[in-house]
Every structure is written in structure tokens, then in C-alpha cells.
Image: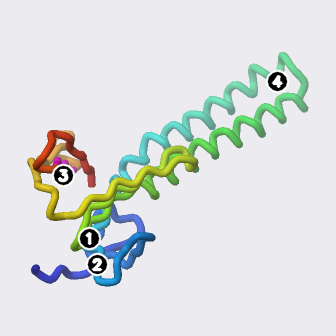
Amino acid sequence: MPQLEESHSTLHSLCVRPNVQFDSQRDDEIVLLSMRAHPVTLIPAFFNTIVFFILIFFLNFVISQLISVRSVLYINIFFIFFVFVYLWMQIVNWYFNIGLITNMQIIDVDFNILTFKEILAQNLPMWRILRLKPVGLFQVFLILEAFISKPQDRRSIASLS
């Protein structure tokens, strides 16, 4: 197996030989790649957050004429809390949905709303690569889409990194 140089950072979408460990890792198992969605996928969440803040700013002028200032303050606190929770959940989902490729297995970890964790792990010799396809808008954002499956069946996993 060729030696891979260590190349990673906390916010990178593809980290080569990262310094990560997981629960079911064997003593002789080495993590070769960790993959997560590119940070650019968080742009819609940040955009929505800005739009929500602009919306509450303009709604304050309309609502303040209809109800008391104290009620407007409570509505603003609730709305701001809601917006920050929305943004936090988007960031947490981005950060913790990760794929790992080790020298022995492929692992896909998905957290859904922090309450449900789905882990798919399969030994590496059991899988084969169906196709590697670059996807993206006018090839500006190059995303490699890898479809891998077991030789026995037609199910496949799409991994974006």
C-alpha cells in the first residue's frame, strides 16, 4: 500500500491520514481518509440566518405598533433563540456527518438532529467502486461523488466530499 502524506485541518472536507479514532477501531487499524461535506454547503444556513435577522428587524416596526414593547421584546428573544438554534444544528450536522476509510473498513457516521446516530461499517475487501464522477456547477465547486457497493447486491452508498 502506498504511503499517504498527512494532510488535514479541522474544517477541511477531505483529510488524509487524520489524527482521529473511533469506538470500534482495532489496534492495527489506521484511518486513511476522513470525509465530510465541504464547508461551502453551510452557505445556505448562514444566508437563511441573515435573512431571518433582517426579517425580524423589519417586523419589529410593524409589530411594535400593534402590541406592547415588552411583548415585542419577548418575541425577539424567542426568534433570535430559534435562529441561533437553527444555525447551530446546521453546523453540528455538517461537522458530525462524516465518512471514514481505514485500511480495513469503510465507515459512514450520520447524526440526525443529535438524537439518532446511524453508523454503517463494512469490511473493505467486500466493497468495489462502481464509479467516480466529478459533479458541480460549471465545475466551479468540484465535488467527487463515489458510488461504492457490495458485489453481491445493488445497494450503494453515495459519499460526497
The secondary structure making up most of the magenta span is: strand
- x then y, percent, for residue 88: 58, 50
| CA separation in Å, label 1 and label 3 | 19 Å
Q: Determine the residue positioned at 28% across, 77% down.
A: 17
Left or right of 94, for residue 143 = left
Q: Residue furthest front?
A: 152
Which labelled disc corresponds to residue 64? Answer: 4
Question: Are the residues at dot 4 and dot 3 in contact (C-beta closer than 8 Å)?
Answer: no
Q: Earlier in the sequence, mark 4 or mark 3?
A: 4
Q: Is residue 106 above or below residue 74?
A: below
In which quarter of the view is residue 58 placed? top right
Residue that numbered label 1 is attached to? 102
- x then y, percent, for residue 129: 11, 53
Which amino acid, by three-letter code, is at mark 3?
Answer: Leu
Which amino acid, by three-letter code, is at mark 2?
Answer: Ile
| CA separation in Å, label 3 and label 2 | 23 Å
Residue that numbered label 3 is attached to? 144
Q: Tell me where the magenta segment starts and ends, as one range.
A: 143-149
Image depth: mark 2 or mark 4 in front: 2
| CA separation in Å, label 2 and label 1 | 5 Å
| CA separation in Å, label 4 and label 1 | 58 Å
Name the foreground residue: 144 vs 139.
144
Residue that numbered label 2 is attached to? 30
Question: Are the residues at dot 2 and dot 1 in contact (C-beta closer than 8 Å)?
Answer: yes
Callout 3 environment at 10 Å: few (<14), some (14 to 19), or many (20+)?
some
| CA separation in Å, label 4 and label 3 | 50 Å
Q: Determine the residue positioned at 71% across, 42% down.
A: 81
Image depth: mark 3 or mark 2 in front: 2
Name the foreground residue: 23 vs 16.
23
Secondary structure of residue under mark 1: strand
